[in-house]
Structures are given as C-alpha cells and as structure tokens.
Amino acid sequence: MTFTPAVTARLDEAMAVAIDEARRAARPFGAVLMDAEEGHVLVRARNTAADGDPTAHAEVNAIRAAAPLGIDLTRTILVSTAAPCVMCAGAAIWARVRGVVAACDAALLAELGWKGMCLPPEGLSLPADPVDHRGTQGRGCRAVPRHQGRREVRHGGSGIVAPDDPGEPAGGGP
C-alpha cells in the first residue's frame, strides 16, 4: 500500500491519538480511522472489552463508531497501537478499510505477555501469505505497556496489513 504525502505527514499524529486512547483503556489498545487521502483522524477508539463485551476491541470500536457518522470505510486507514487480532483483522477486511497500520506485531505482543494474540497454526486455513508486512519504523511500539509483570521491551517489529484487493473481502462475502 502506498500512502499519499498527506497521510505520510500525519501518520505519527494519528498513531499518537491511538496511543492516547490506549492509555485511557483498561486493556491498553487504541485505534483511529484516518482519511486515506488527506490523513485527518476521523474516529478514535479504545479497547472497552473489560466492560463486558469481549468483541469491543479498539479496532472494532473504531469501525462501529464510523457507521452512524456515515464514513465511507473504503476511504480510511485503520491505525492501531498493535497488530489486529484475527477478529479485528477480519472486521477491517469486511469493512473494506483501505489498509491497517500497526505499531507492533503479534510477536512483540506475546513477548509483552499478551499470549492471546498468538494462535496455533494448526487448524487455520488461510491463503498463502495474505498479509503485506512492511515497517512503520516502530511508531508507537513503546506505547504498549508491559502486562502481568513482564519486562518492558524497547524494540519491536511493526507492519502494515492491507487486503490484496480493497474492493473484495477475503472469502468473497457471506
């Protein structure tokens, strides 16, 4: 995925907003939807799963918040403090967001103590390498706090996740 100059110029600002949301959440994850052309933050959200809805991850909350505002999700980029879980990645694909920028990958999250992010490869049926992984120079990785007494990690991977064809969700539809 190639970003417009406006998005590139505002990506750090968008990640800072997502980090701010993560810091306000009981479970430290935040996300924003930004305009894919101009780079303006359109929606901000945090993980609210601790309130009783296990699907209320930051990415899903951002997508849900966009609906009543009439935001065309095909013209947005989802910016998240962490690599989306399988549920959130699926929501982003079905919502047809143009792409996802993640501050850190699942391996770093696991190292920080978030073991639920790592799924066993057996039993999963996915197309060969459906995800495009490219670096974002570690934007926001340090914002994911340590968990359950684990040591803080000062390095980490990052990536961009984008559907191969933003016009067609994986699997063809319901």
Image: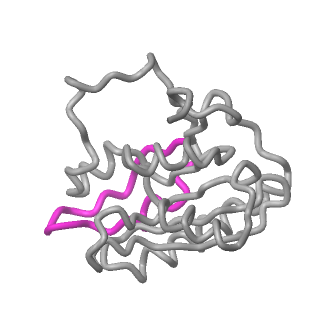
Kindly identify the residue that appears in the image at 45 percent across and 66 percent down: 58
Residue 108 in percent (x, y) is at 33, 48
Query: In terms of image quadrants, where is residue 71?
Result: bottom right
Residue 169 in percent (x, y) is at 58, 34
Residue interval drawn in magenta: 137-159
Quarter of the rendering occupied by the N terminus: top right
| Residue at the extreme front | 174
Residue 147 in percent (x, y) is at 22, 66
In the image, residue 141 sits, relative to residue 2, either above or below, namely below
Task: State whether the magenta stretch is mostly helix, strand or loop.
Answer: loop
User: Going by the image, does 130 lie left or right of 121?
Assistant: right
Kindly identify the residue that appears in the image at 24 percent across and 38 percent down: 119
Kindly identify the residue that appears in the image at 69 percent across and 44 percent down: 98
Q: Indicate whether residue 132 is drawn in magenta.
A: no
In the image, residue 8 sits, relative to residue 34, either above or below, namely above
| Residue at the extreme left | 149
Q: Indicate whether residue 147 is drawn in magenta.
A: yes
User: Going by the image, does 87 lie left or right of 37?
Assistant: left
